Amino acid sequence: MTERPVHNHQYDVVIVGAGGAGMRAAIESGPRVRTAVLTKLYPTRSHTGAAQGGMCAALANVEEDNWEWHTFDTVKGGDYLVDQDAAEIMAKEAITAVIDLENMGLPFNRTPEGKIDQRRFGGHTRDHGKAPVRRACYAADRTGHMILQTLYQNCVKHDVEFFNEFYVLDVCITETEDGPVATGAVAYELATGDLHVFHSKAVVFATGGSGRMYKTTSNAHTLTGDGMAVVFRKGFPLEDMEFHQFHPTGLAGLGILISEAVRGEGGILRNVDGERFMERYAPTIKDLAPRDIVARSMVQEVREGRGAGPNKDYVYIDVTHLGEDVLNEKLPDITEFSRTYLGVDPVTELVPVFPTCHYVMGGIPTNVAGEVLRNADDVVPGMYAAGECACVSVHGSNRLGTNSLLDINVFGKRSGIAAAEFARTHDFVELPDTPEKMVAEWLDQMLSDHGNENAANIRFELQAMMDDKASVFRTEESLTEAREEIHKLKKRYNHVVVSDKGRRFNTELLEAIELGFLLELAEVTVIGALNREESRGGHAREDFQKRDDEKFMKHTMATKKDGLDLLSEIELTWKPVVQTRYEPMERKY
Ligand SMILES: Cc1cc2nc3c(=O)[nH]c(=O)nc-3n(C[C@H](O)[C@H](O)[C@H](O)COP(=O)(O)OP(=O)(O)OC[C@H]3O[C@@H](n4cnc5c(N)ncnc54)[C@H](O)[C@@H]3O)c2cc1C
């Protein structure tokens, strides 16, 4: 083994990730106990900053609304796979979450009377589906940017310590008489190539999504599911990973997001004949139906020959009737995106769009305090997760727009408080022996010359294959092929060569490591999808077109037998869905 400097640190709480969830947790944990945030990106570059449309809360600032309607919409939007107790907490605490941000200084758009303005978004309705409701608070189409900046400024105010460009590659788990306990994390420092062991009483994962397993995606390059994969490799389960959300309006051929706020403000989807086709699929709320339904309808239009463009492979979003002032005032960024990336001016032209992989509903299973579950019943003391990498499950099988910025604030806050309280009331548990050993050996192996495969090629093949075989529609055949392809890619991955052997800023090495995470999670996604012989939310099986509550009203839990072996078998078990007041119904809009 080559010598690699190892640095040791001790903090009460270590938070992995500095997006909305991680920083919201840090704002709670920082003032209570010694807290460190480890992040592979500079905090303000996290994907939360790309969020456009809004964050919802039943403030009832512009029309009648209440948190019970919000809970119902979330449960129905998630096609009843939502844990209803968690959804209720999120909808109730949404109101404080928005006010917290306002008090921290977030410049929301205002009504003429000075209240926080609210706009419509898909699936958010008045009185259990009667009509769309204005529930999303927003700051133009830069809501996430404003949230991220506001949270960062408040972390600085609370003296939270950041370790920027630190890649966490392992979580430390100490086996005790009472089972496994989280005792820290191992990070790789990009600037030096050194390893850092952080010994802590609690670890909070807030590492974001995994959309980069698909080629067509709205997700930033860095969304490679690291936290989920790290936890999974330790032998802990991942929940409901078969549910990835495909957002209806990605710029055609590119996947760059055109926010749903566009439809919230009145934008209309049209096929090649100019028809407003959503009237046929969701007669009551039309273009504002939840994303899974709109995405499937768009694919259906294309399949039936009503697509536009030279290859008839996209539809249009039409905002020409909204007028230049509304576009400039409320949707300036997406107007600019269309001009820059497609050369299309939304003021006068229809914008070509097609579904793009946007969000993962599944993730690290947690309870409502953010504590990580190691099976359907037991938690891992000291381990927490929040945000897109976690599965509470408030989104079930399909997340409603604006519920993620909400989720990261509500459950980021909860996990920050819970982790700090845990740290305050518990002593340090010893780290396992040489906690950095696994990572050090892994890096050495990646840097040794043991093959001739190229990581970029494997990544490209994985992404194209996932687009082809495991996206909006799936079948047993396509998923079986996907699984075989992933196995082949995993075998090739074992022979990847990293040509840069250097210590400083070795991004080639880290991208190869991230590819390993993606391969791991792609397999979990495909296996879950193969086993779920029904169609529900974001998971549409052409060979099982109906929702099957009798067999599948349950969460998938995927576990790996031998975490270090990329090819080791994945086992599926199940976790019950928490139902409180809403009986599953047919999902009509
Ligand atoms: C283009 C776009 C628009 C969106 N618009 C909306 C919207 O309008 N409303 C809404 O509700 N939702 C929206 N979403 C979804 C929402 O923005 C995200 O789900 C949410 O912001 C995720 O926040 P997070 O804190 O969980 O993760 P992120 O903001 O992605 O942050 C992840 C953090 O983890 C760190 N990290 C990752 N891996 C490691 C590692 N190995 N070691 C150390 N650190 C690591 C990163 O550095 C980063 O700081 C949008 C998403 C996209 C992509």
Image (cartoon, helix red, strand yellow):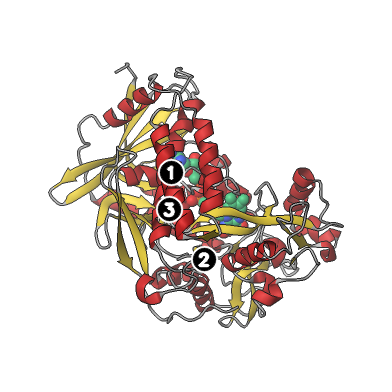
Q: Which mark is residue 434?
A: none
N-terminal of the two: label 2 or label 1? Answer: 1
Mark identifier at residue 542: 2
- CB at disc 2 and ligand 1 closer than 8 Å: no
Residue 199: x percent and y percent?
29, 36
Spatial CA distance of label 2 from label 3 is 14 Å
Which label belongs to residue 486? 1
| Kind of residue at disc 2 | Glu
**Element class at badge 1:** helix
Residue 181 picture location, percent across and down: 23, 47
- The relative height of residue 334 versus residue 392 in the rendered view (above or below) is above
Query: Separation of disc 2 and disc 1 at Cα?
Result: 21 Å
Please determine whether, in this image, residue 305 is positioned above or below residue 155: below
Please tell me whether mark 2 sits on a helix, a strand or a loop.
loop
Q: Amino acid at mark 3?
A: Thr
Q: Is residue 115 above or below residue 519?
A: below
Q: Residue at point 66% right, 48% down?
A: 256
Identify the residue at horizontal 31%, vertical 65% (top origin): 575
Above or below for 388 versus 168: below
Q: Is mark 3 within 8 Å of ligand 1?
A: no
Mark 3, mark 1: which one is toward the viewer? 3
Left or right: where 400 falls relative to 533: right
Work out whether mark 2 precedes mark 3 in sequence or the reverse, and give the earlier one.
3
Q: Quadrant of residue 320?
A: bottom right
Q: Along the horizontal axis of the image, is 270 left or right of 71?
A: right
Asked if one can make out residue 106 in the rendered structure from this viewpoint, the answer is: no
- The residue drawn where x is 49% and y is 55% is 478
Q: Which mark is residue 480?
A: 3
Instruction: Decide which of tag 3 and tag 1 comes sooner along the chain.
Output: 3
> Circle 2: is it few (<14), some (14-19), or many (20+) Cα within 10 Å?
some
